[in-house]
Image: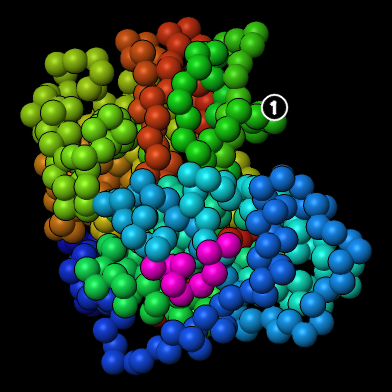
Amino acid sequence: MGSPASPEEGVRVAAARSSVIDSFRSCGLTGVHIDKEELRRRLIMPKYLRIAIRNSIRFKDPNSVDENQPADENAEHPEAPMVVFINSRSGGRHGPELKQRLHQLIAEEQVFDLQDVKPHEFVLYGLGCLEKLASLGDQCAKEIREKVRVVVAGGDGTVGWVLGCLGELYRLHREPVPPVGIIPLGTGNDLARSFGWGGSFPFAWKSAVKRTLDRASTGQLCRLDSWHVVMSTPMDEEIKLPHSLKPTEDCALDEGLEYEGQLPEKSSCLGGVFYNYYSIGMDAQVAYGFHHLRNEKPYLANGPIANKLIYSGYTCSQGWFFTPCTSDPSLRGLRNILRMHVKKVNCTEWEKVPVPSSVRAIVALNLHNYASGRNPWGNLKPEYLEKRGFVEAHVDDGLLEIFGLKQGWHASFVMVELISAKHLAQAAAIRLEIRGGEWNNAYMQMDGEPWKQPLSKDYSTFVEIKRVPFHSLMIHGE
């Protein structure tokens, strides 16, 4: 049987996985001079609005503005008003130097360190302040609220966190929603790669930051699917959750699918959103180990190369390569604990998808990039797509590509794109039912943020994934 991958896509595949090329592309060494003062003129908001936004966030009150203070009628609204969020703990921790550089390019009040200001605070109070002033007749505030763009300096988890908070504007009917550009500071940076921002923090970063802000101010807008996750678990243990997952009262699972086991009298519910992928199994366990090390010994994880070496070490130590699946219950295939159903494109009925016994990680992927720019789904030939009932994958097609990874050797060949991953399904909705048995925990992750989920022997944990009914807006960096 021939490979399902299309050979004519080789150039795009090579470009997607080349961190070196991405780094050069991000450097801004394009020969185009960007005038610093002209850039500041296009990005910086009038001082009275910057102060009003800062005070509204500080006092957590969008109505803290003085209604009797007249608007500055002489203030000119910038062409592309912008705010920047920095995660100083992402990647090699370039945050402090980057913040200093950004203060030279745009106003200090328009740069938010996520250690101090959370994205939801900016949405509630910062944007709320602009909306309040606009309602009082401030035309400059109105223009800025309609045009403001956001740049996130961080990894995939940080970008997803900001996108999730901005997405609340749809639910609250507070459009327009600001589009998002990216300065890649994480390890994988798959969201940044997917939208033309490069795969790593560039070595010529001072010039690159200016170039990035310029691109973010004029870049084309693209649509991105986002996916809502609801988890119902019989365990009431307190666990450390990623930013993208929160306790919720809304735990309405689809009643069109019967449960295999008994339901507990009481269950805990979690909800969240992801943009790139959700996974369960060995890959999440490796990521979980890395994140714990980064938190406990941050001096070891001081850059993308060091991070990837540590990832490789955890991959070996967790038995991905060298421990047979039969030797330890915690390392057996996911089929022993998991039952999966999907809704396919344009279908309303759930369909059971068999999980092969060899699969030790299952990934539901939204983007073409995974694990630092790899494309494990592959660029599939039209005849293979037709045979499997698949369609060509896009980031805004309302579908997730579900694939499995076996042991480490299989995953390694997938990551260097010698072979494709184990194609399981293409789905508009997913339901996982997980029963612990001899497993006390299952490792999961969403957009690079892993956690350890306790499991029950007697009752099932349910994970249901459905598309959010609106698109996120991304700024393309090329």
The residue that appears at 33% across and 20% down in the rendered structure is: 336
Depth check: 61 or 166 in front? 61
SS majority, magenta: helix
What sort of colour scheme is used for the picture? rainbow
Seen in the image, is 390 located left or right of residue 78? left
Q: Pointer 1: what residue?
A: 249
Q: Position of residue 325 (x, y in %)?
A: 17, 23
The residue that appears at 40% across and 30% down in the rendered structure is: 451
Using the rendered image of the protein, determine whether residue 228 is visible from the camera's viewpoint.
yes
Task: Identify whether 372 is placed above or below 217.
Answer: above
Label 1 crowd (10 A; few <14 / some 14-19 / many >=20): few
Using the rendered image of the protein, determine whether residue 354 is visible from the camera's viewpoint.
no
Seen in the image, is 39 located left or right of residue 317? right
The residue that appears at 31% across and 77% down in the rendered structure is: 207
Assess whether residue 223 is covered by the magenta stretch: no
Residue type highlighted by circle 1: Glu
> What residue range appears in magenta?
101-109
Q: Quadrant of the N terminus?
A: bottom left
Seen in the image, is 305 located left or right of residue 400? left
